[in-house]
Image (spheres, rainbow, N blue to C red):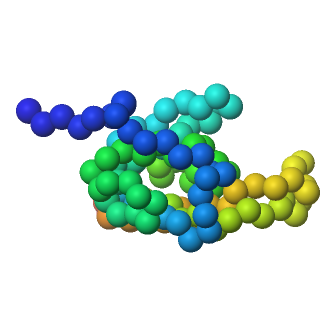
Amino acid sequence: MAYTQIMGGGNYRKWSDWKEGEYVEGTIVNRTPDQFGGMSVVLKVAENNINVTPGQQITLNNCGAFRQVDEQLVRGTKIKVVYQGKDVMSKGKFKGKEFNKVDVFVDDSTIPTTSNESQEDTSSL
């Protein structure tokens, strides 16, 4: 039987500690609730430039970018997260507030499909 560690033994790094251009990529092994009601991402690291040994885990706090693609951030999905620095909200209820700008890339080949998506459309037959 093979086991994948999904909690404990990992690294944590606040977004405020990241520098522009730093990145991490790997496979999502878990999602955990954060103190604000969002879901952090626990990633098994494949590559990075933030001094995390490949194979180790890192917990990434929830952020606006994660909330926008939440349904795609599931266990087994490979992602790359690139920190783009700080920016200021230009509209909405938080207009004028500073935020950490994060780009999220997903390896399409690792996104699980639902049973409806994986079945052929036979309605026109």
Q: Choose between 61 and 118: the one closer to the eye.
A: 61
Residue 41 drawn at (x, y percent): 48, 43
Query: Relative to 111, is 82 above or below?
Result: below
Residue 8 drawn at (x, y percent): 36, 30
Residue drawn at point x = 12 percent, y = 36 percent: 2
Residue drawn at point x = 56 percent, y = 71 percent: 21
Residue drawn at point x = 35 percent, y = 63 percent: 47
Q: Choose between 14 and 99: the one closer to the eye.
A: 14
Residue 25 drawn at (x, y percent): 40, 60
Asked where in the image residue 51 lies, by quadrant, the reply is: bottom left
Residue farthest to the left, as pictured: 1
Asked where in the image residue 75 lies, by quadrant, the reply is: top left
Query: Relative to 62, is 78 above or below?
Result: below
* 32 horizontally vs 120: left or right: right
Quarter holding the C terminus is: bottom left
* 65 horizontally vs 24: left or right: right
Q: Can residue 77 be seen in this view?
A: no
Q: Choose between 59 and 16: the one closer to the eye.
A: 16
Q: Choose between 121 and 25: the one closer to the eye.
A: 25
Quarter holding the N terminus is: top left
Residue drawn at point x = 46 percent, y = 37 percent: 31
Residue 13 drawn at (x, y percent): 53, 46
* 68 horizontally vs 122: left or right: right
Query: Relative to 55, is 40 above or below?
Result: above
